[in-house]
């Protein structure tokens, strides 16, 4: 049997469960997960390697239609992931209220011309049974297999069913594309920024977290046993600064404490995390500011 290796792109609506599935498969945190939609901004790659294949799973931003500001960046990220992946997985949230949105994901994935399969996500309730059957029948019309996943399923069971199917979609390769020992292409600086942003989504509300960006100013890990991270939480409106800081700085302190705990679990080292809140007015609408945070719209 020939060795296989390649990129598999996850395609779905915002909050479809793409990041949760990626983290679940890897058994490691590489993508941020919140109960709010459209939290993934940059693509995240997780790596599964065994003696038969190396599967590079790319979590892309949720599918939206927009040509301006940060939303244009999100759409370009998704389109680039679809174009550069060797295979795709359509992630279909069974709780999606508008079935036409799921149809669009199926059509978009099929139109790519790439080999693909479908994953029906968030199938946690017994009342989902009828909707799952109906959706599986629709997927069958595309001639591709489907898998049902739930947060109740054990990682080993999901891997046992899904991994062989993913391997079948991949091209032959003489060897792994990345070091078999690594589980993500993300560096720790970027992962730190994403974890801080995740905590912003957990502790901020309404439009505020969507207008935040994280800029890691310094990431120092060779100056003793403690990793030191200095970062800015950037907001787009002056009025949002007070909300992020909170009364007596309680909110930004809570964000910092929870982000530090999460990062310490990931790196298994003690971390010093220093956060400051900055205002860069309407950064989400200005290309030069977006580039400063790494949000570059691809041509």
Image (spheres, grey):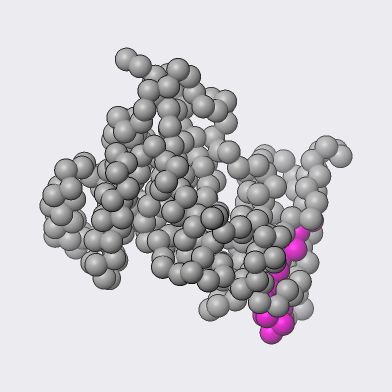
Residue lying furthest bottom = 239
Residue 103, how many percent across, how many down? 24, 61
Res 231 quadrant in image: bottom right
**What's the magenta region?**
230-245
Label tally: 0
Q: Is residue 82 left or right of residue 115?
A: right
Residue 63, how many percent across, how many down? 40, 61
Residue 209, how many percent across, how many down? 59, 71
Q: Residue at x 39, y 37 (%)?
A: 86
Q: Is residue 10 left or right of residue 231?
A: left
Q: Residue at x 77, y 52 (%)?
A: 229
Q: Residue at x 60, y 42 (%)?
A: 186
Residue lying furthest right = 223
Q: Residue at x 57, y 59 (%)?
A: 297
Looking at the picture, tell me which residue is in the foreground, 244 or 117.
117
Q: Is residue 146 left or right of residue 28?
A: left
Residue 219, how many percent across, how many down? 78, 48
Looking at the picture, tell me which residue is in the foreground, 115 or 215.
115
Res 167 quadrant in image: top left
Q: Is residue 21 above or below residue 132?
A: above
Q: Is residue 217 in view? A: yes
Q: Is residue 85 above or below residue 136?
A: above
Residue 241 counted in the magenta span: yes
Residue 233 counted in the magenta span: yes
**Image quarter hosting the N terminus:** top left
Q: Is residue 119 in view? A: no
Q: Is residue 53 above or below residue 240?
A: above
């Amino acid at each position: 049997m020939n060795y296989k290796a390649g990129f598999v792109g996850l395609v779905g609506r915002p909050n479809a469960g793409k990041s949760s599935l990626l983290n679940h498969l890897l058994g490691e945190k590489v993508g941020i997960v919140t109960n709010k939609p459209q939290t993934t901004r940059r693509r995240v790659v997780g790596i599964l390697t065994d003696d038969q294949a190396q599967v590079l799973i790319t979590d892309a931003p949720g599918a939206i239609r927009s040509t301006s500001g940060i939303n244009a960046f999100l759409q370009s990220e998704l389109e680039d992931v679809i174009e550069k992946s060797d295979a795709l997985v359509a992630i279909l949230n069974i709780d999606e209220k508008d079935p036409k949105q799921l149809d669009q994901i199926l059509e978009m994935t099929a139109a790519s011309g790439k080999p693909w399969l479908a994953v029906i996500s968030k199938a946690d309730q017994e009342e989902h049974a009828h909707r799952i059957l109906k959706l599986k029948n629709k997927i069958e019309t595309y001639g591709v297999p489907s898998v049902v996943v739930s947060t109740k399923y054990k990682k080993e069971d999901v891997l046992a069913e899904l991994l062989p199917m993913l391997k079948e979609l991949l091209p032959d390769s003489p060897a792994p594309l990345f070091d078999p020992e690594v589980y993500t292409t993300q560096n720790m600086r970027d992962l730190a920024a994403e974890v801080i942003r995740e905590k912003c989504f957990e502790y901020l509300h309404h439009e505020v977290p969507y207008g935040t960006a994280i800029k890691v100013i310094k990431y120092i890990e060779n100056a003793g046993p403690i990793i030191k991270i200095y970062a800015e939480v950037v907001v787009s409106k002056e009025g949002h600064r007070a909300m992020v800081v909170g009364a007596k700085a309680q909110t930004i302190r809570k964000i910092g404490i929870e982000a530090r705990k999460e990062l310490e679990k990931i790196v298994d080292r003690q971390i010093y995390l220093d956060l400051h809140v900055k205002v860069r007015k309407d950064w989400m609408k200005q290309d030069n500011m977006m580039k400063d945070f790494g949000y570059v719209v691809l041509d």
